[in-house]
Amino acid sequence: MPRILCFGDSNTWGYNPSNGSRWGEDIRWTSRLQDALNIDKDDGSEDRFVIIEEGLNGRTTVWNDPMKPYRNGSAALPMLLLSHRPLDCVVITLGTNDLKSQFPSEPAWIAEGIRKLIGQVKECDNAGHPIPRILIVSPAPMHDANNWASGFRDGRQKSLELASFFRAVAEEEGCDFFEAATVCEASPIDGLHLDEAGHAALADALAKILR
């Protein structure tokens, strides 16, 4: 069964914008993705995939958050690649938290953080298996009027700009790319996190790519 690691932030963890709880497995895009991929075919055969959820609220690509420890994605990814090996694919869905004003939050710098994560996947020991395929997903656009607006400067505009920089890095590094903004954006409830419809739309789109 193909093994797919989904490495992301609170929208991969499943943060509910209404109350801060975690969406259930019937809602989260990772769970929906597994359901969409695991299908029975007309000829009696079946496709089965293993989706590994690795989402953490506040996770960045490469930055240490002095207010929230353990959020540096590049510090966590190498260990996760080893603990979950062998992997067939790694889906990276980060970038929103890098837009916080406390970090060098220009889209070009955030894209270089994505490039570092790509390098870590390429360099990992995959237990004798080929290097995993890598799918880069630019995040769903945020809203400036969000519950944490004071922590972001020009957040929505920069979130919309991330896709072009991420796409360029993905092409240069030989990775697949998907722009989440083509199917969803953050809920207006809190301005940062996906609602139920957003999770469903993202899962459907990624299932088509991964299948």
Image (cartoon, helix red, strand yellow):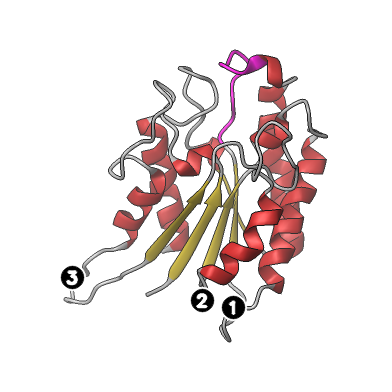
| Residue placed under numbered mark 3 in the picture | 42
Give the class, few, some or many, for how many residues have Cα within 10 Å of label 2's Cα (few <14, many ≥20). some
What amino acid type should be assigned to the residue bearing mark 1?
Asn
Q: Secondary structure at mark 2?
A: loop
**N-term mark: 1 or 2:** 2
| Residue placed under numbered mark 2 in the picture | 86
Q: Position of residue 46 (x, y in %)?
A: 24, 73
**Is mark 1 in CB contact (under 8 Å) with mark 2?**
yes
Between 56 and 149, the one nearer to me in the picture: 56
Relative side of 200 to 147, left or right:
left
- Could you say which quadrant of the image residue 34 lies in? bottom left
Separation (CA) of disc 1 from disc 2: 5 Å
Separation (CA) of disc 2 from disc 3: 29 Å
Whether 208 is among the magenta residues is no
**Is mark 3 in CB contact (under 8 Å) with mark 1?**
no
Q: Position of residue 71 (x, y in %)?
A: 65, 43
Give the prevailing secondary structure in the magenta stretch. loop
What amino acid type should be assigned to the residue bearing mark 3?
Asp
**In front of the other: label 3 or label 1?**
1
Between 17 and 166, the one nearer to me in the picture: 17
The boundaries of the magenta stretch are 140-149
**N-term mark: 2 or 3:** 3
- Could you say which quadrant of the image residue 146 lies in? top right
Q: Secondary structure at mark 1?
A: loop
Relative side of 185 to 175, left or right:
left
**In front of the other: label 2 or label 3?**
2
What amino acid type should be assigned to the residue bearing mark 2?
Pro
Residue at position x 18%, y 76% in the image: 43
Q: Position of residue 51 (x, y in %)?
A: 41, 60
Separation (CA) of disc 3 from disc 1: 34 Å
Q: Which numbered marker is on residue 126?
A: 1
Residue at position x 75%, y 20% in the image: 153
